[in-house]
Amino acid sequence: MKFLRNGCFILLLSGTLLILPACTKQDFKDLADIAKMWAAAHDLMDDQGKPNYVNIGARTTFGISTGDAEADAAIDAGAVVHNFQEAEKLSNEGKNRGDIKKVDAAIKLRPGEFTYRNQRGSMDFFEGNLTKAEKDFAEAEKLAEKYGKVSRLRNIESRITSLTYQFNKYIQNLAHPSADNEEEIKSRYHKIMSDSFYERYTFTKDPSDQIRAGKHKSASER
């Protein structure tokens, strides 16, 4: 029951409810009631059912303990979920609008998320900022290596996906294809993609990755 109550309150703090098909409206009402009871018992909600902004604000803004380890953990977890949601929103806005500043903001919120580095690197790459882009790709790889094989593969796929998306915009005249170093951009794009598919092949052993790598290598040498 303690785990359920903590989990419920974390969801309330983050402003998130996981909408599961099997849950009824009454299930969610019961869930909210349990969370409110837990919050009141831990001095995170007042007698009128309103959040105790003094305790919550002191923890989220200054990192000051509420004096209750469980309440601290719930607030911290809620903040993590909130940061994740905000960062994802900024990342998506940056992608859809071609606004690299949005991606910068996402990285500030979640500096350890390598997919945002690949996204920003890909955007910079097709703006002709190749050095900045490759620095982001290298940082993304470094971050992924900390978490093992699965994260390394996820990073490769993230790089491939981000570069492919930006390349398609580039050739459709949607992302400033008039850079002075246009031929260099295309050549280095194919080189990075070739290396990425070869690298993915070492994980997947999928022959199609070898074929894609070969095609990009040929394109890079034209």
Image: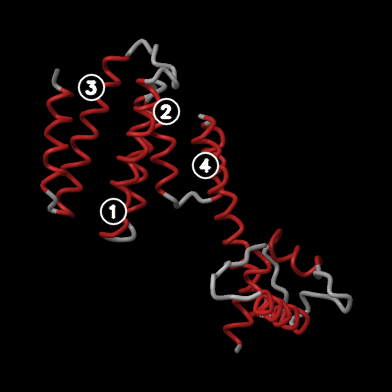
Q: Earlier in the sequence, mark 4 or mark 3?
A: 4
Q: Residue at x 36, y 43 (%)?
A: 139
Picture layout, residue 175 above or below residue 116 = above
Q: Earlier in the sequence, mark 4 or mark 2?
A: 4
Picture layout, residue 151 above or below residue 6 = above
CA gap, disc 1 and disc 3: 25 Å
Q: Earlier in the sequence, mark 1 or mark 2?
A: 2
The residue to which callout 1 is attached is 152
- Assess disc 2: are there few (<14), some (14-19) or many (≥20) residues with their C-alpha within 10 Å of its C-alpha: some
Name of the residue lying farthest toward the bottom: 1
Three-letter amino acid code of the residue under disc 1: Arg
Task: Indicate the quadrant containing the N terminus: top left, top right, bottom left or bottom right.
Answer: bottom right
Label 1 secondary element: helix
Measured from the top left, where is residue 170 in percent x and y?
38, 22
Name of the residue lying farthest toward the right: 48
Label 2 secondary element: helix
CA gap, disc 1 and disc 2: 22 Å
Three-letter amino acid code of the residue under disc 2: Asp
Residue 92 - label? 4
Three-letter amino acid code of the residue under disc 4: Asn
